Image (cartoon, grey):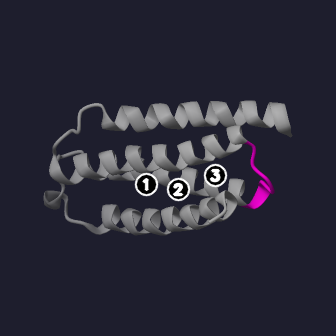
Amino acid sequence: MELARFWRVGGAWAAATGVAMGAVAAHLPSERFGLPEGRTIVQEAVQMQMWHALALLALGVSVRRSSRLTALAGCGLWCGMVIFCLALYVTAFSGHHLGPVAPTGGSMLIASWTLLGVAFLRHD
């Protein structure tokens, strides 16, 4: 599958699951979360997931032919979003922190956004 299509499909699936997780956060009884602040953690993860889903959709629609930097940045956005958000969901529902998993995903997102900016400076 070409990268632009992967980003469009991945962004759409991320948006769909983000809406579903938002509904879970809104309607699940508080005692079903693993932490007292579990609902807030899920809401933060949903917000981050939805922003990056939109970014992936935009990237997939706008990039006709990706450079290596753009390809790396787009794949980093996808991976960072999944790692970051899943770590927050696990923490919210189980009450167990996964160590440096969420910060690793967040760092990937920061690096990917930076790399995307460099790619746009160099190629667009």
Considering the image in quadrants, where does the C terminus appear?
Answer: top right
Compute the Cα span from label 1 to label 2: 6 Å
Q: Which residues are magenta?
A: 61-67
The stretch drawn in magenta includes residue 32:
no
Secondary structure beneath label 3: helix
Task: Name the mark on residue 46.
Answer: 1
Q: Position of residue 37 (x, y in %)?
A: 24, 45
Which residue is denoted by mark 3 in the rendering? 55
What residue is drawn where x is 38% and y is 52%? 43
Q: Position of residue 112 (x, y in %)?
A: 59, 36
What residue is drawn where x is 47% and y is 31%? 107
What residue is drawn where x is 65% and y is 57%? 3
Task: Identify the amino acid type marked 3.
Answer: Ala
Task: Identify the amino acid type marked 2.
Answer: Met
State if disc 3 and disc 1 touch (CB < 8 Å): no
Badge nearest the viewer, 3 or 2: 3
Compute the Cα span from label 1 to label 3: 14 Å
Considering the image in quadrants, where does the N terminus appear?
Answer: bottom right
Identify the main secondary structure in magenta: loop
Which residue is denoted by mark 2 in the rendering? 50
User: Which is more N-terminal, label 2 or label 3?
Assistant: 2
Secondary structure beneath label 1: helix
Q: Is residue 119 left or right of residue 52?
A: right
Vertical placement of 58 versus 95: above or below?
Answer: below
Q: Position of residue 30 (x, y in %)?
A: 19, 58
